[in-house]
């Protein structure tokens, strides 16, 4: 089953699940219970903490839920902030090349905090992916995500996202249509 956030990030080949970590988790759980898919494939845009450039296409099956306050030792969590699932049709030997995608309901606009994410080997951010992997793991479903970078996580993040979003969506659609059978 191919998924997307929805709203301005919708695709004719993907089911929308909602924006952010809460809405996407609730809606995806309902969808999985109803349709009983054999795998989940999430497509969307992402911000880069600096390791990837605008319009890079990245596939991942690892996510984190690190809030920015954690990077400055201003909070803690009793929950496990990292999750990994087995992607469909990928051998265990290629798992380690998958970058970690951080999910939060907030977009990083501070380069210093982005650098701290890189120090923790977290390379990208997308608001929904941690939820998608959490639901997949709960239902024991293979899962991966495909992301196209729209912006760097800096003071221009929103402006660059808006400027690059349409082209990123075209790249996602082109990649999916060239690699998956619909």
Image (spheres, grey):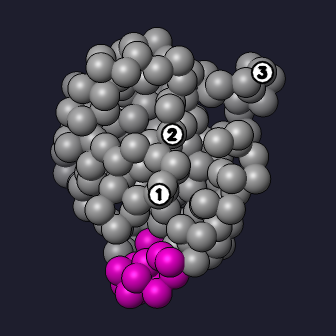
Q: Mark 2 falls on what kind of element?
A: strand
Q: Give the mark nearest the N terminus, 1 or 2.
A: 2
Taking the image as drawn, is residue 165 in sight?
yes
In the rendered image, the vertical position of residue 116 relative to residue 42, given as above or below = below
Residue 76: image x %, image y %? 22, 38
Q: Which residues are magenta?
A: 152-166
- Residue at 40% of width from left, 63% of height from top? 9
Residue occupied by mark 2: 2
Residue occupied by mark 3: 91
Q: Mark 1 falls on what kind of element?
A: loop
Q: Are marks 1 and 2 in contact (CB under 8 Å)?
A: yes
Spatial CA distance of label 2 from label 3 is 20 Å
Q: Nearer the viewer, mark 1 or mark 3?
A: 1
Spatial CA distance of label 1 from label 3 is 28 Å
Residue occupied by mark 1: 11
Quarter of the image where one finds residue 3: top left
Q: Nearer the viewer, mark 2 or mark 3?
A: 2
Answer with left or right where residue 123 lies relative to residue 181.
left
Residue 4: image x %, image y %? 42, 49
């Amino acid at each position: 089953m191919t998924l997307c956030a929805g709203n301005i990030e919708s695709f004719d080949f993907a089911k929308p699940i909602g924006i952010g970590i809460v809405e996407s988790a609730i809606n995806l759980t309902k969808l999985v219970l109803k349709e009983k898919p054999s795998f989940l494939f999430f497509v969307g845009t992402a911000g880069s903490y600096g390791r990837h450039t605008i319009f890079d296409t990245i596939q991942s099956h690892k996510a984190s839920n690190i809030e920015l306050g954690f990077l400055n030792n201003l909070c803690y969590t009793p929950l496990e902030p990292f999750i990994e699932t087995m992607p469909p049709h990928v051998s265990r030997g290629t798992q380690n090349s998958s970058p970690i995608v951080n999910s939060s309901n907030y977009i990083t606009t501070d380069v210093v905090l982005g650098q701290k994410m890189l120090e923790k080997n977290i390379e990208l951010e997308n608001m929904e992916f941690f939820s998608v992997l959490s639901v997949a793991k709960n239902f024991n479903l293979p899962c991966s995500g495909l992301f196209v970078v729209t912006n760097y996580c800096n003071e221009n993040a929103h402006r660059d996202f808006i400027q690059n979003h349409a082209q990123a969506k075209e790249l996602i659609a082109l990649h999916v249509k060239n690699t998956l059978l619909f």
